[in-house]
Amino acid sequence: MSQNDSFLTGKMSRRQVLKLGAAAGAGAFLAACGAPAAPAKTADELLKSADTIPMDKLIAEAKKEGNLTTIALPHDWANYGEIIESFKTKYGLKINELNPDAGSSDELEAIRANKGSKGPQAPDVVDIGIGYTESSKKEGLFSAYKVATWDTITLKDPEGYWFAEYYGVLGFQVSKAQIKNIPQDWPDLLKPEFKNQVALAGDVLKSNEAVMAVWAAGISKTGKADQAAAEEGLKFFAELKKSGNFIPVIASAGTMAKGETPIILRWDYLGLADRDTLKGNPDVAVVVPKTGLIAGPYAGAISAYAPHPFAARLWWEHVYSDEGQLMYLKGYAHPIRYNDLAAKNKIPADMAAKLPPAESYKAAIFPTLDDLTASKKYITENWRKVVLGE
């Protein structure tokens, strides 16, 4: 007699009743609770996906690594000093800071030079001009990751390989002690009164900021952010050099304080930060030019060879949190999540009041990534020949 027959006739042994009850109980439990939960993903599985990692898991794994290696993050650039210190305090990780004065190309070369290395010279994260992003992604230098606030980032790689962090516009940082007639637009820089007084804040062959300054000068002539503007920008700097106005040195707050570089072409947020740093010695004017107003975002990414991949992801979670984005604003840079923060009334009035008038930015041009990449290539490849005559 089968078990089913025994049940129908009521002639079942105690063992048969117990086995049937156990099976029925298990079935009822599964029906009520669903299938068994999938096993938690391993650390390697979490890193293979670009998906957001739950913060508790991410923090735990990052603490196991214990360290994060950054590069090209000067403490007075976009308030990175406070961002770095707040990260260390909040999560208890150590940060190894490589070459704060490195340019975007230096950062990428550091990744290439340290492939497979777990040593202290291998960066985990980079902060680069957005014109360097796509070629680096194609080269396989980045690892994809999407932070928890991913949907509110307005400029990013759809797959998560890079993401804009903040932006500013190219302007003039001017020493009032040396310059009486403060230039208001790019053509003003060619005036004879500014002989030996105009400098860039970086090397055009390495610095995104310097490349964008050249392009902005060209855009002031053409009105468009394209390669034609890149050509005009090189011509402008060739004329600036020929007139004797251009000083071929890397300018900074220090060189301005010494009186060596009275006019520096640099991001507005860095000029505003230098104004605070110099504290009137000398007094600094920060000019948002009338034309050639180009918005230049910087982008973050994770090295595909990061020695501390979880700490790298935790870093970006910190940077893209409301707290991290407002630290950028405190450093006068416009955080990429600005619109989202404004919509949620998260921007303190005192921070907004310290920025140049909003009207100054209305004419700002946000270039396409294709135009930016092509123009950067043209400027860097032709700078020596057209401007320096080499």
Image: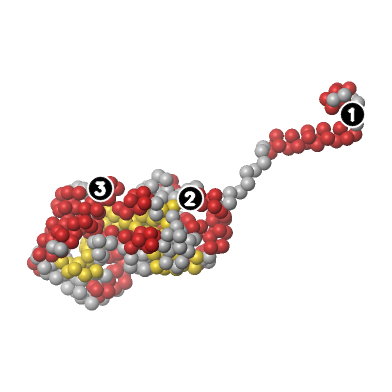
**Which amino acid, mark 1?**
Met
Left or right: 355 in relation to 291: right
Real-space CA distance between mark 1 and mark 3, rounded to the nearest whole angstrom? 82 Å
**Which amino acid, mark 2?**
Ala
> In the figure, 249 relative to 144: above or below?
below
Compare residues 173 and 221 and report the one nearer the observer. Answer: 221
Label 1 environment density (alpha carbons within 10 Å; few <14, some 14–19, many ≥20): some
Residue behind mark 1: 12
Upstream in sequence: badge 2 or badge 1: 1
Q: Secondary structure at mark 2?
A: loop
Count of numbered badges drawn on the protein: 3
Residue behind mark 2: 148
Residue at x 85% of width, y 35% of height: 18
Residue 364 visible from this viewpoint: no
Where is residue 85 shown, x and y percent of the image?
A: 45, 67
Upstream in sequence: badge 3 or badge 2: 2
**Which amino acid, mark 3?**
Asp
Residue at x 25% of width, y 54% of height: 376
